[in-house]
């Protein structure tokens, strides 16, 4: 996992107990708030035990599964046997597996959950740890309403409950269920707001034949991320039309030789990414983040690159230190991240620490767009479709109409910290770099 990732949710098991596993073969899938990833085995062996269930929250460093590697079961059986056995019967195999599992459990026992009870309600290790740290007894824990699947208590449920507990908006004792106090019951001198009631879901009237499609987990996370961004940043846009005729002509001239030499396709994306990286070096106050009332000026230029997935969702892999790459390196990085994004093979740290984002809406034929800022960044650039259009061409001998390749750059930025002058100059700098492209450039 990436350095900033402390936990993840187990979303599915790809292997069952007793299944054979090869090295580098995926065993289970995990999900953070940004990416879903398969976790491969590092060894050949047999899956003996699953330590977590689907939807459990797992902290980095915890054991998720136990795998028997070749010869391990036999060795354990020999050590535990009172007398040597010439030939082990087939019926002894389950006993051997159980011996290994028992030995593993003895070596690294899983601590029993605090305040255990006869309740059939499931609690993840994270929820139990939070309850233990806050001194919440089992009876009180059982009474907390959950919003997870089947009424399961989630991390967010616990956080809201603990906050209400501290603010006095929830009163509890060891023999009663949590009770939310009314504002009138609180001392007048207090200024705490009562805990907000959860939003009530209204049933949408349907028509016969309508199909209801549940949102995917990633879809729900993206929806929340986008609405949070709109509520956080003051979005404003600047648009610039760019003549990229020189860029188009140059790429047409070198793309075949580039692919033959490098084994990579040369798309327009790395060219645009290079222009953005150079503009960020020129205007470093676009390469910032907002932390409360503080502006964080980023040292590195890490460009996020929005990529469409097969299921219609988007993911944003990050090119680290993009300003240090030449065009060949940029092309290889763009192609690699795009391919692995489509194949769901990105690592969690490859979609983190972006400082500015670029999205290519022109891929789908859009002329321009108004993209939503990827928090906690303060800007995102949308690349419109390149179109051949009639245009006025100015020359020393007069103006005339010609066919030019043009596109729109749409720059969304956070007006809390980026004024219109900076936002406009930045996107104009990107446009100027592209219009002045050297058609004789070597690559």
Image (tube, helix red, strand yellow):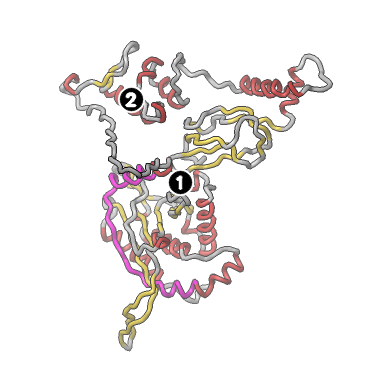
Task: Please tell me how many numbered marks the rendered image carries.
Answer: 2
The residue shown at (58%, 28%) is 50
Residue placed furthest toward the front: 208
**Is any atom of residue 309 visible in this view?**
yes
Q: Residues within 10 Å of mark 1 (few under 14, many from 20)?
A: many
Q: Earlier in the sequence, mark 2 or mark 1?
A: 2
Give the quarter of the figure containing the C terminus.
bottom right
Q: Does 271 lie within the magenta span?
A: no
Q: Residues within 10 Å of mark 2 (few under 14, many from 20)?
A: some
Residue bearing mark 2 = 161
Front label number (2 vs 1): 2
The residue shown at (52%, 42%) is 37
From the viewer's perspective, is residue 3 above or below residue 279?
A: above
Residue 407 place in picture, x, y as percent: 37, 68
**Is any atom of residue 303 visible in this view?**
no
Camera-nearest residue between 365 and 384:
365
Residue bearing mark 1 = 352
Camera-nearest residue between 38 and 3:
38
Residue 60 place in picture, x, y as percent: 51, 33
Camera-nearest residue between 137 and 386:
386
The residue shown at (44%, 55%) is 305
Residue 319 place in picture, x, y as percent: 48, 54
Most common secondary structure along the magenta stretch: helix
* Picture quadrant where residue 393 is located: bottom left
Extent of the magenta region: 222-251
Camera-nearest residue between 285 and 334:
334
């Amino acid at each position: 996992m990436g350095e900033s990732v402390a936990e993840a949710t187990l979303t599915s098991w790809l292997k069952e107990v007793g299944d054979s596993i090869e090295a580098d073969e995926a065993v289970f899938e995990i999900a953070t708030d940004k990416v879903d990833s398969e976790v491969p085995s590092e060894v050949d062996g047999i899956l003996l035990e699953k330590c977590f269930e689907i939807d459990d929250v797992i902290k980095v460093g915890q054991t998720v599964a136990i795998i028997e590697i070749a010869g391990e079961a036999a060795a354990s059986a020999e050590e535990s046997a009172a007398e040597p056995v010439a030939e082990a019967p087939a019926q002894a195999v389950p006993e051997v597996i159980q011996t290994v599992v028992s030995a593993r459990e003895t070596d690294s026992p899983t601590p029993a959950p605090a305040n255990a009870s006869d309740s059939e309600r499931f609690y993840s290790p994270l929820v139990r740890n939070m309850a233990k740290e806050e001194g919440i007894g089992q009876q009180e824990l059982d009474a907390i309403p959950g919003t997870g699947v089947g009424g399961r208590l989630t991390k967010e449920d616990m956080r809201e409950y603990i906050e209400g507990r501290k603010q006095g908006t929830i009163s509890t004792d060891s023999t009663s269920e949590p009770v939310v106090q009314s504002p009138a019951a609180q001392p007048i001198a207090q200024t705490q707001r009562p805990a907000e009631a959860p939003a009530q879901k209204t049933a949408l009237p349907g028509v016969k034949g309508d199909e209801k499609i549940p949102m995917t987990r990633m879809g729900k996370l993206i929806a929340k991320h986008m609405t949070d961004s709109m509520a956080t940043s003051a979005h404003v846009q600047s648009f610039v039309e760019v003549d990229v005729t020189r860029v188009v002509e140059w790429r047409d001239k070198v793309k075949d030789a580039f692919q033959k030499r490098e084994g990579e396709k040369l798309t327009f994306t790395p060219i645009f990414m290079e222009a953005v990286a150079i503009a960020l070096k020129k205007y470093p106050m676009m390469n910032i983040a907002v932390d409360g009332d503080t502006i964080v000026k980023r040292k590195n230029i890490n460009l996020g690159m929005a990529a469409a997935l097969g299921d219609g969702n988007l993911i944003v892999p990050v090119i680290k230190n993009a300003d240090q790459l030449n065009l060949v390196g940029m092309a290889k990085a763009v192609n690699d991240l795009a391919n692995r994004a489509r194949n769901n093979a990105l690592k969690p740290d490859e979609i983190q620490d972006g400082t500015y984002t670029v999205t290519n809406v022109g891929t789908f034929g859009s002329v321009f767009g108004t993209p939503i800022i990827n928090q906690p960044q303060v800007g995102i650039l949308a690349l419109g479709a390149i179109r051949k259009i009639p245009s006025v061409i100015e020359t020393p001998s007069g103006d005339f109409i010609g066919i030019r390749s043009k596109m729109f750059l749409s720059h969304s930025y956070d007006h809390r910290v980026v004024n219109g002058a900076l936002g406009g100059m930045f996107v104009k700098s990107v446009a100027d770099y592209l219009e002045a492209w050297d058609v004789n450039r070597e690559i």
